[in-house]
Amino acid sequence: MAVNDCCRRFDERYNENPRRIVPLSVTIYVQKALPMTTRRKFLHTAASALAAGPFLASVSRADAPSIPIIDTHQHMWDLKRTPLAWVKSSKKLNKNFLTLEYREATKGLGVVKAVYMEVAVPKAYRNVEADWVVDLCRRNDNLTVAGVIAGSPGDEAFEDYITPYAKSGVIRGVREILHADTAKAGLWRSKVFIRGIRLLGKLGMSFDLCQQNAWLPEAIRLVDACPQTRFILDHCGNPVIKWSAEERRPWRENIAVLAKRGNVICKISGIVSQVTPGWKPKCLAPYINHCMDSFGPDRAIFAGDWPVCLRGASYRAWVEALRAVVDRRSESERRKLFHDNAAAFYKI
């Protein structure tokens, strides 16, 4: 059919019902976004393209990315369900953050799935949080498809606690934030703790390493003691982004050593919460690039750390900053960072 004939028939059919000849998603978007004359011209052009050759089944929003995102570090909380003492000192964080807020924060960025990350609830509320996450992941009304829950591998009752969740089909791992006080107490090297971490490996679950950067050597020791367990280093190992090049040296060395362990992957996340007004992506680049270069293209994954990231920047600002830093890397590496590595690691 000639292009002119196609356009004439388009005009006739458009006057009858525009949705019959243009995909519904396109029609809705165009009707909302464009005035009548402009949207008619847009749809007329689409008809011309249809006559000339294959036409896309749908048209993405202008701000939609070409690479989809799996967010591997999604926090949410309802303060009436699970009280959180650590958010009380922050006006930005001392309120509820749930699925509606998450959808708004990630709107237009191409986030297609998310992995929930525990939020340091009091021990008495861990089952409440974990049961809620299991239910959330099993529903189809939100982006959350898997979860990492809180747990204490050093507790004698850890096996009884974690085994039912390992069988849930949606809980992929455990995190216990390990600060210097617990490390000094010898927890990381205790037989009970190491046995609990090894149990996670037997159950097919992972353990998130989240500690102060000075304790990266202890993390390396723990990984070496549990070679059959998969580990995730949270937040690039928690460096301080205001460090000088010399101050970064111990962190760089420890990251390079840890990255040699093939059962560890690295979350590119967290550091944006430290930025101050006027910041630029280049202030994060030394940390992002070192982690990605050390762990390689197959063991680095994106993580949003929302809403904790709001301490420094919005979710959108963080995603756009990371895209800017990795822009010169190959499309294959960027796709692995934002999507493919997470899909493989978390089996989602």
Image (spheres, grey):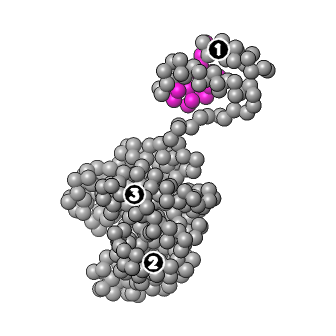
- Residue 183 rendering spot, x and y as whole percentages: 33, 82
* 26 and 94: which is toward the camera: 26
Name the residue type under label 2. Answer: Arg
Front of the two marks 1 and 2: 2
Magenta range is: 16-30
Per the rendering, the mark at residue 280 is 3
Secondary structure beneath disc 1?
Answer: helix
- Residue 180 rendering spot, x and y as whole percentages: 30, 80
Residue 340, visible in the rendered structure: no
Kindly indicate the quadrant of the structure image that contains residue 281. bottom left
Give left or right: position of 140 versus 313.
right
Q: Earlier in the sequence, mark 1 or mark 2?
A: 1
Query: Which quadrant is home to the N terminus?
Result: top right
Query: Which quadrant is home to the C terminus?
Result: bottom right
Name the residue type under label 1. Answer: Asp
Per the rendering, the mark at residue 50 is none
- Give the main secondary structure, helix, strand or loop, of the magenta stretch: helix
Per the rendering, the mark at residue 252 is 2
Kindly identify which residue carries mark 1.
Answer: 11
